[in-house]
Amino acid sequence: MSRVQLLDASSAPLTARRHYAAGDPGPLVAALATVPELLEVALPFLSTVLGASALDVRTKEIVIVRTSALLRCGYCVDGHSVVALDAGLTLAEVGALRGEGPIEWDVEGEDDLVAWIDAVAGGRGPVDSDLAARLAGCFAEHEIVELTLLIGATMMLNRFCTALELPTAQVVADRLASVGLR
């Protein structure tokens, strides 16, 4: 049960109702709709950070699932595990990102990416210079900026969703159960 009321279309403020036009927008939007001024600035930012960019979907989902697992955000781990599977990650890779097994990457640079995520999302203070140099050998500077902002934005969402105890959608829980991730 969420710690805040998740607004439906009939109870959402008029300025937030357009986000319900296609049906239930999900718990994140339903929670943000209680403060439409924040909803209107948060969604464009999140759409930009999480949407199509120079980074491929696989890379973005590695970042989101791993960061969410480190911060123990069940809502984000669940939802993005499904997206990661749809983006082509294997069940073993998704499980490893979730902390359910060892990580063995076949794609060059993904081990350094996971180490970067662990250092940024799970560490304190500066990131190790050797790790930064290894990451720079795999990603362009603009990609490193985007990766790091994606980690930070995911951390913000993780804390928001966890603090407010946003629920995992039943369709997501069913999909995870069907592949043994729940």
Image (cartoon, helix red, strand yellow):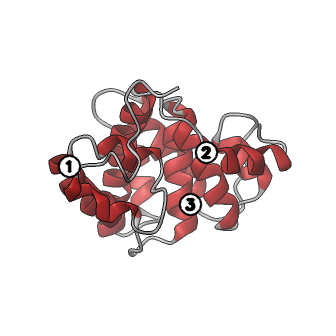
How far across and how far down the image is residue 161, in percent?
Answer: 42, 35
Instruction: For the residues labelled 2 and 3, say whether their Cβ atoms are less than 8 Å apart.
Output: no
Q: From the image, tell me which residue sits under label 3.
A: 109
Which is closer to the viewer, label 2 or label 3? 2
CA gap, disc 2 and disc 1: 23 Å
Q: Nearer the viewer, residue 13 or 52?
A: 13
Q: Which element is circle 2 on?
A: loop
Q: From the image, tell me which residue sits under label 1.
A: 36
The answer to whether 145 appears left or right of 100 in the picture is: left
**For mark 1, does the 10 Å Cα neighbourhood hold few (<14), some (14 to 19), or many (20 or more) residues?**
some
**For mark 3, does the 10 Å Cα neighbourhood hold few (<14), some (14 to 19), or many (20 or more) residues?**
some
Q: Give the vertical position of 133 relative to 142 (above or below).
A: above
Mark toward the start of the polypeptide (1 vs 3): 1
Q: Give the vertical position of 157 relative to 142 (above or below).
A: above
| Residue 30 appearing in the image | yes
Corner quadrant of residue 84: bottom right
Q: From the image, tell me which residue sits under label 2.
A: 169
Q: What kind of residue is marked 3? A: Gly
Q: Residue at x 45, y 54 (%)?
A: 134
Mark toward the start of the polypeptide (2 vs 3): 3
Q: Residue at x 70, y 60 (%)?
A: 85
User: Disc number at residue 95?
Assistant: none
How far across and how far down the image is residue 102, in percent?
Answer: 74, 38
Q: Which element is circle 3 on?
A: loop
